[in-house]
Amino acid sequence: MNAIVSVTNNWGIGLNGQLVVRNRADMRMFREQTMGGTVVCGRTTFEGFPGGALKGRRNIVLTHDPNYTAQGAEVVHSTAEALRTIEHDDPDHVWLIGGQSVYEALLGACTKAYVTKNDVTVAADAFFPNLDALPTWTCAESLESGTTDTGIGYEFLIYEQHR
């Protein structure tokens, strides 16, 4: 499984349920990488999708609410159930897409993390683990860099987990 995330300099990912940086190139990269695969996310992340379930992908929603239903998605209620649900999927095409608690719960099961690092620090109340500070993760590749429409520099990086 892979994680895919857009972060700020302090690894912030969200504020009040919204992304903290709007980056068209990041959205394009997200779509290209995840299309045709499986995405695993939490309830709040899923409910933030403007059109509901992400089209062209198998959507799995992790929630503790036993009564939760999600149109166009499979609902699971534990990390163990999430892992069982994806065990027959091609791990290179399974994407952990957030939010914070789902990243924290399942990042250990990931072999790669596709990180868009936005060169800005803004207020955030949700964070991705700082891979640069974790001894099992290393930055393996820089794919591309650029600037957003609002002038924020960014870089696409691939981190690998070594166990």
Image (cartoon, helix red, strand yellow):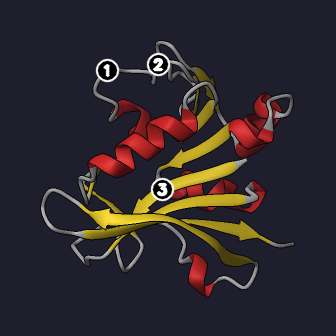
- Name the outermost residue toward the top: 71
Can the viewer see residue 63 in this picture? no
Label 2 near label 1: C-beta < 8 Å?
yes
Q: Is residue 81 left or right of residue 59?
A: right
Q: Mark 2 is on which residue type?
A: Lys
Q: Is residue 95 visible?
A: yes
Describe residue 88's horizontal placement relative to residue 18 as left or right: right
**Cα separation between marks 1 and 2:** 9 Å
Name the kind of residue labelled 1 in the image: Gly
Q: Which mark is residue 98?
A: none
Mark 1 crowdedness (10 Å alpha carbons): few <14, some 14-19, many ≥20: few
Residue shown at 44% from the left, 21% from the top:
53
State the residue position of label 2: 55
Q: Residues within 10 Å of mark 2 (few under 14, many from 20)?
A: few
Q: Name the secondary structure under disc 3.
A: strand
**Can you identify the residue that label 1 sits on?**
51
Q: Residues within 10 Å of mark 3 (few under 14, many from 20)?
A: many
| Label 2 residue SS | loop
Spatial separation of the CA atoms under disc 3 and disc 2: 19 Å
Dot 3 or dot 1: first in sequence order is 3
Q: In the image, which is nearer the foreground, mark 1 or mark 2?
A: 2
Front-lying residue, 50 or 27: 27
**Residue at 60%, 61% in the rendered image:** 104
| As drawn, 18 above or below 63 | below
Look at 59% across and 76% down and name the residue there.
131
Tell me which numbered mark, 3 or 2, is placed earlier along the sequence: 3
Q: Which mark is residue 5?
A: 3
